[in-house]
């Protein structure tokens, strides 16, 4: 029994050593700064909340549903007509990645509302593709 316990501990240690960093090296996020030091502080949380009050819906969900550049009432009516859930978003995303540039960070015309799945899926894929093309 003791031997089996030791084997399990060595497996756990081996797994812990093989972890991959969650942030790519060489990006502006890989430094030692906290999210607050990168600009995501109380001021950002307040601006984010105000933006989401005015821009409720994920722009990618609206685009994927082919609703077009409709206003609030049109989105609600079109979703109801098609039997779709309302495409609420909860993330304020920077259309153009700011990479630490505070002017671009605070430029509200560079902000868009996304849902979590589009922010961590389609948007990340687009940014990675853009960087890949830029390197070529």
Image (spheres, rainbow, N blue to C red):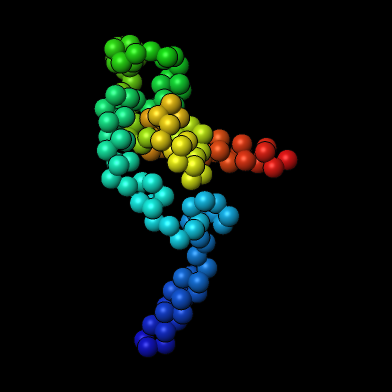
Q: Position of residue 109 (x, y in %)?
A: 43, 26
When the figure is inspected, residue 24 is found, relative to residue 4, above or below; the finding is above
Q: Is residue 44 visible?
A: yes
Q: Position of residue 30 (x, y in %)?
A: 50, 56
Can you say which quadrant of the picture contains the N terminus?
A: bottom left
Name of the residue lying farthest toward the bottom:
2
Residue at the spot 27% in from the left edge and 34% down from the top edge: 49
Name of the residue lying farthest toward the right:
136
Residue at the spot 32% in from the left edge and 47% down from the top edge: 41
When the figure is inspected, residue 62 is found, relative to residue 11, above or below; the finding is above
Residue at the spot 27% in from the left edge and 38% down from the top edge: 46
Q: Position of residue 39 (x, y in %)?
A: 38, 46
When the figure is inspected, residue 7 is found, relative to residue 136, above or below; the finding is below
Q: How many numbered discs sit on the rendered protein?
A: 0
Residue at the spot 41% in from the left edge and 21% down from the top edge: 62
Q: Is residue 87 left or right of residue 21?
A: left
Can you say which quadrant of the picture contains the C terminus?
A: top right
């Amino acid at each position: 029994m003791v031997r089996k316990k030791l084997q399990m501990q060595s497996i756990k240690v081996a797994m812990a050593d093989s972890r991959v960093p969650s942030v790519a090296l060489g990006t502006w996020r890989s430094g030692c700064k906290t999210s607050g030091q990168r600009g995501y502080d109380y001021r950002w949380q307040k601006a984010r909340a105000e933006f989401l009050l005015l821009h409720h819906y994920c722009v990618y969900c609206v685009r994927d549903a082919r609703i077009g550049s409709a206003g609030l009432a049109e989105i609600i009516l079109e979703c109801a007509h098609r039997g779709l859930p309302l495409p609420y978003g909860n993330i304020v995303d920077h259309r153009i990645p700011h990479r630490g540039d505070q002017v671009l960070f605070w430029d509200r015309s560079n902000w868009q509302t996304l849902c979590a799945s589009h922010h961590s899926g389609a948007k990340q894929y687009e940014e990675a593709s853009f960087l890949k093309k830029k390197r070529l």
